[in-house]
Image: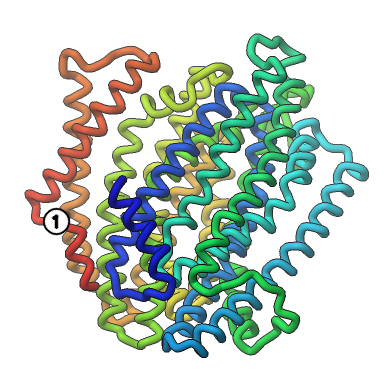
Amino acid sequence: MSTLATNIATERSQPFAKPRASFVSHARLIGILTLLSRILGMARETVMSAYFGAGTVSSAFSFAFKVPNLFRKLLGEGALSAAFIPLYAQALKDGDEAAIEAANRFAAASVGLLATILVALTIVGELALWGLVHVTALRPESLLIVKFTAIMLPYVLLVCGTAFLGGILQVHHRFALPALTPVLLNLIHIAVIVIGARILLLHGAQEPAKTAIQTRLAYWLSAAVLIAGVLQVQLLLPSLRAVGFRLRWVGDFWTPAVRRMLKLSVPVGLSAGVLQASVVIDGLITVCLTRSPDAGGSATRWFGHALAYPMATGALARLNWAQLLYQFPLGVFAIALATAIFPTLSTDAVDKDQGKFRSALRHGVIVTLLEGLAASVGLIIVRYPAIRLLYQHGAFTPADTIWVARSTIFFAAAIWAFSLQQILNRAYYALHDTITPLIMSIVTILVNTVVEIPLVFTHLGESGMAAGTLASFSIQAVVMLVMLDRRVGGLGLARIAVDVAKMLAGCAVMALACWTAQRVPGFPGGSGQLASMGQLAILMLVGGAAYLGTCKLLGVDLRLKTIASA
């Protein structure tokens, strides 16, 4: 942790430093902090599963909590940020006081525009939710979703603002504090559940009082999300002041630079909107096709035909918990690397240095696949002990574990594709090409929907939703990589393919080593917490050693520091 403290201190002491540092070193810093956040996020979901289980309240809260985070991905980390970061990096490129002041005015105008858009969206959203409650007849679970969403909707302004302000800091090579902001949310989330459950006497409560207490606690949790959002913004303000940026209202934010950013952001916004619409559609499909204890029947009617509900109560919550498992390595490795590489790619694209751009991108792809392929296979191997250790407490049942494990297989198999997509999207945005990701996003949502709906009516049930995600993102990642290779004059795909073949061999050896370890006398048996912890530790150590050892023997360069010259 001393290195981590040194990195954070260095960021604070160098307000205008713009070193040509290795994006891998930045990724390590982001990865360490993201690891802390993800561990707390897993702890948060462990507490959530123990106190709420996979019932209607947890499903409703999970869906409602996704709404502000969808806007974060759409605007805070999506359309505006993807267009803003390359332009802001270009504005700072000269480094003199006049350029810095102009860049900060552009940043302030961009923040003002974002705030205006988000306030308007929040007002419109609240009115729409009010109409849903008072005009339509909603199922009890749907009514809970609407009420939780109404409470948390103002968080849209806070979480998007935090993400956008974090983008400003990233251009100044300050990655620590933006990566720490989720920690606050997770800590508050955990504290509210644990303390609130004690205050409300949730432990030992019986139905129907138990559900009523869980609902009240979820309302408290929804309000606490807003408090966390305010603290997240406050955390970034000192560092923003250190780089010379001040939150200020710019009366005329309709400047040529902002108009250019908007022109670039429209296709990005549509692309992100399509992907986030896919998330919403998946959630709505799950809600509509899930049997509810209050539904009064076992069948639903679609286009005049009676169809048995293919998903059981709690499917939405279980899918959310399965997604969190794959998002753990995705956030720690892939998103950290993509976040660190984006300013580098943007600078190289501005400088029109195709050699450096290709080199940085090629190394980014190799490192991403080195980690992503291993994470895909590794999570499939350890899914049962991981789920039992993290989630199987209190109201979370062994039957829930089986369903989460089935969905985890498909989500885990797509980690390499999710990871690669993070790099590829930023490469296109750095080249100011926002149309290609948009087109591919549309293709992705079509493939996802076409695949998943028939599958949920098979024996896969809710796991069919995850299978659709695997198919669509795998196709998108491969196609976009091939297209980008042609676009930049060659990334050396043949060399990358050779490394990938070696990595796949390492994955095969890892799977064999873990299979053997599970059959060695003394391997912990059973499904208890201590047994699951022992199984997870042994499989991770054996699998990691087998993978890295095989890759090293086959000549895969594991010395990530050599990428610093990219």
Question: x%, y% of residue 316?
Answer: 61, 35
Report the residue at 48% width, 21% height from top: 392
Q: Given the current orientation, which residue lies at the most extreme left position?
A: 553
Number of other residues with Cα within 10 Å of mark 1, as a class: few under 14, some 14 to 19, many 20 or more: some
**Label 1: element kind:** loop
Quadrant location of the C terminus in the rendered image? bottom left
Left or right: 146 with respect to 362? right
Residue 144 picture quarter: top right
| Quarter of the image where the N terminus is located | top left
* On screen, residue 566 above or below 329: below
Q: Nearer the viewer, residue 510 or 175?
A: 175
* Residue found at x 71% / y 28%: 217
Image side of residue 508 versus residue 423, left or right: left
Residue named by callout 1:
556
Task: Work out whether residue 292 can be spotted.
Answer: yes
Colour scheme of this structure image?
rainbow
Instruction: Pick the residue in front: 230 or 298.
Output: 230
Residue 297 in percent (x, y) is at: 76, 23
Q: Is residue 342 visible?
A: no
Q: Amino acid at mark 1?
A: Val
- Relative placement, left or right, of 417 versus 185 is left
Q: Residue at x 39, y 69 (%)?
A: 14
